Amino acid sequence: MSFPEKHINDFNKIVQLINDARKRAFIKVNEELINLYWNVGKIISEKVEYANWGAGVVDELVNFIKEKNPEINSFNRRGLYRMKQFYETYCTGSECYGIWNDLQDNSKPNMLSQFVSAVPTQIQQSEKEEDTFVSPTATQFQKPEKDTFVSAVLTQITWTNHLEILSGCKSAEEKLFYLMMSQREHWSKMELRRQIKSAVFERTMLVNKIVSPQATQLPETVKNVFKDTYIFEFLNLPKDYSENDLRKALIKNLKDFILELGKGFSFIGEEYRVQVGNHDYYLDLLFYHRDLQCLVVFELKIEEFKPEFIGKMNFYLEALDREMKREHENPSIGVLLCKGKDTEVVEYAMARNISPALVADYETKLIDKKLLQQKLHELAEFFEQNIENE
């Protein structure tokens, strides 16, 4: 259907008003729902602990609610115990609340401190300007006006996401990580489930700092934008695949690929042509990162990292910065995605490199989460020992 051109701007304004109102209404409804489940869980938890409520009393409560509100079906026995678990997991005095409270105090470091402090400040500013789904965004990354964990964090994501976190996460740090990331990245239930299953928490906490310290062009926040290992279990690649197969599969599954990369990436093109002199060169995958404000090129390798890969990447980054980078943008960043890497070889190769380049590897199958959890446990023990020795 065609519309008169002279009225399009006014029509768009009205549609925007409608959409903004719907977002605000959804946010308000979600806040009320989370507060309701919190308060119900609080009453049940306290009655079970102090008033000798047993399973029989909870069953009677279920029947009582059904009789008074027959149209409501979410307050069954399982649902009520979920609300109780929800309250007990995050209430004042819980481990989750204690860690969150410490995050507001820079003098009390914990495992999440480095991750939280490195969240790009541009995210907070840009999302305020856009009036996006969650408001205010990422309030847990800065000290809130009111020291209220419920309103600052818990009411900012959906109940279905809370259920995924409660059922899929074990440690308090892991729960808080996915709470913060769900809020910041606006993950749907299925996106959150995939991130938990692919051990994003463990991989983020275990990320290696493999960028040369001389690479001063890299923004401070880059270490928590990129991962050390990427998981592409969604590709369904043949046994013997080529770099072209890998690139095509990533483009075909672009939504899942960007979910694994993280929000902020905007796809520009594949085999992107840059001209230097009389020669054409083709970059495997080119993105722009909104928060880092720079071009990001991904070069794909189906073999283990080799030192000579760095020279080619540096050439591409120089071409991008001379031909495409705008004055207000930061230097381009290159990511070599290799099928494995020797950390010592990477460190030697990067030692004298001054270009903003990173080396990451990728897996086409999910990594054993128990192995990652064990490594993270060892890291946590090392972290605690360092704090004690300071």
Image: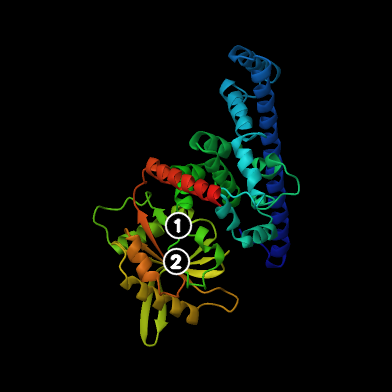
| Label 1 sits on residue | 227
| Label 2 sits on residue | 211
How far from the left and from the top, in percent, is residue 131? 69, 55
Q: Is 260 in front, or is 273?
A: 260
How far from the left and from the top, in percent, is residue 333? 47, 70
> Which of the 4 image quarters holds residue 81?
top right
Q: Residue at x 40, y 55 (%)?
A: 229
Q: Earlier in the sequence, mark 1 or mark 2?
A: 2
Q: Answer with left or right where residue 371 lies relative to residue 164.
A: left
Which mark identifies residue 302? none
The kind of residue on which mark 2 rests is: Val
Residue 111 visible here: no
Number of numbered markers: 2
Vertical placement of residue 185 versus 323, above or below: above
Q: Residue at x 51, y 50 (%)?
A: 386
Q: Residue at x 50, y 70 (%)?
A: 295
> Which of the 4 image quarters holds residue 50?
top right
Q: Answer with left or right where residue 115 lies relative to residue 269.
A: right
Quick one: SS at disc 1? loop
Vertical placement of residue 287 versus 281, above or below: above
How far from the left and from the top, in percent, is residue 208? 43, 58
Q: Mark 1 to mark 2: distance in Å?
A: 12 Å
